[in-house]
Amino acid sequence: MHHNSIEGLTARYGERWRWLALVTVVLGTMATVLSATVVNVALHDIMLEFGIRQGQVHWLATGFIAAMTTTMLASAWLLDRFGVRVTLAVAMAAFTVISIVGGFAHTPEQLIAARIGQGAMAGLMQPMGMYLVFRIFPVERRGQVMGIYGMGVILAPALGPVLGGFLVDQLNWRYVMFAPAPVTLLGVWMAWRFLPLPRKRPPHYPFDLLGLLLLGTTIALTLETLNRMQSWSGQESRIVLQALLALGFLAAFVLRERKARHPLINIQLLRQPVFLCATLGAMALGLALFGSTYLIPLFVQTALGFSATEAGLLMLPAGVVLGIVFPLAGRLADKRSARSLVLFGIGMFALSAVLFALTGEYAGFAWLAFWAILGRIGIGFMLPALSTGALNPLSPEQLGAGSSTINFARQLGGAIGVNLVALTIEFGEHRSGVPTYEAFASAWWLVAIFVALAALPVWRMRV
């Protein structure tokens, strides 16, 4: 009996092994979410050290999210091929090495490459939690376990800016890159010790590498085109050409997914009106979540003169409130219309963005924290209701593909949203090379309008 078979783990640890396995995947997921948010409070210092503008530094956030968006679609094949133990251990080991190397970066290009590498590994790690819960826990305990897992995931973006602010002010921005490494290194050891080998694996099937390459190229070209639009003058022809190429690769990806026997994304699901509307809503949710998480620390540090620690502490109450709202909204999603909950969440977040846009240059800490709380309440209502509204109508055979598609749409919305926010700030008014309050106000109005427009497809969900 192999010591990492389910029988071997049960013999060594009793039923405790399931909780030890859960802690292992929570470590990996928290490290990825922490890495996605912790760097935001360091952007101001990174701009100053490398002498770069906001139009380049935003790739530290965008590159991470874009890489994570692309590679998370590969996790299902890796799990079928190698199992959760090997896949998670290797991904966390690579994440550890990349984080340490990125902390010693000497150029902005090296740092951006490290962030893209982190994001690629994060995309493989993030889906592991739900996969493991549904594999090793009995049906009657999955709700309880997912609640515990979800709380751990929610705490990471709440604590990330606080930890990042402390590291930046007390040490150096480079420690923001080093911070996840001890967590993922511990996770590698725990994965090898507590995660089970699969009882059986499905028959080998080819990985849709062509689909992944087409998708990755489409996302990269789209984000690069948006980035180049920040310096439109003299680059008009190149920008138009890149935009046309992105559309061409997108068309090729759709054709590939329609013909592939094992596609990355099940295009047929998007023909269902409810699922399509929920997917568009998920993109708006990603824009709201990642756009605001990127914008708030940069806004209060650059335009309002807050320190990195103050910027992190500003986000803490909002993260705590999100942790409280999330399980409550989840219970409501089982009893109320998903459409009504998502529309309420959209309204709350749009209100939060408008209040930030109308903020005077001397707004107090308490008011800013309260407006951030309003936005997180909105996100808390949107997230579970969108998931139930999208997945409940699907058959059991479609749940895996539906879940990965909704997650992908949310991450894609985040990647595009951060880029649009950065583009708006770059086009805004600057003083001595630094964006002014008016530039950030324009970005907040953009976020408010885009999220509000998502109410149109959500209204058609009819669930």
Image (spheres, rainbow, N blue to C red):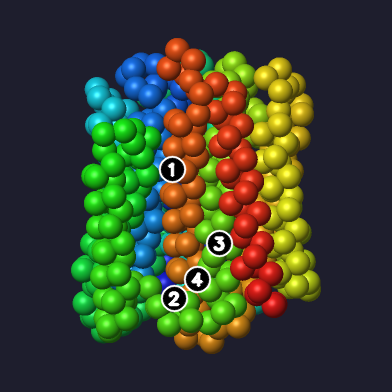
* Mark 2 lies on residue: 401
Question: Is residue 419 visible in this depiction of the protein?
Answer: yes
Residue at image position (62%, 49%) is: 449
Looking at the picture, tell me which residue is in the foreground, 384 or 286. 286
Q: Mark 1 and mark 4: span between their CA atoms?
A: 25 Å
Q: In this figure, which residue is indicated by the disc labeled 3?
A: 282
Quarter of the figure that contains the C terminus? bottom right
Three-letter amino acid code of the residue under disc 1: Asn
Of the numbered discs in the image, which one, if any, rests on residue 403?
4
Residue at image coords 37%, 44% = 226
- The residue lying furthest to the top in this view is 432
Nearer-N-terminus badge (3/4): 3
First-in-chain label (3 vs 2): 3
Instruction: Work out whether mark 1 precedes mark 2 in sequence or the reverse, and give the earlier one.
Output: 2
Q: Name the residue under label 1.
A: 419
Label 2: few (<14), some (14–19) or many (≥20) C-alpha neighbours in 10 Å: some
- Mark 3 vs mark 1: in front: 1
Residue at disc 3, secondary structure = helix
Q: Distance between the residues labelled 2 and 4?
A: 6 Å
Mark 4 Cα shell of 10 Å, populated few (<14), some (14-19), many (≥20): some
Of 193 and 458, nearer the camera is 458
| Tag 2: amino acid | Ala
Assess whether mark 4 and mark 2 are in contact (beta carbons under 8 angstroms).
yes
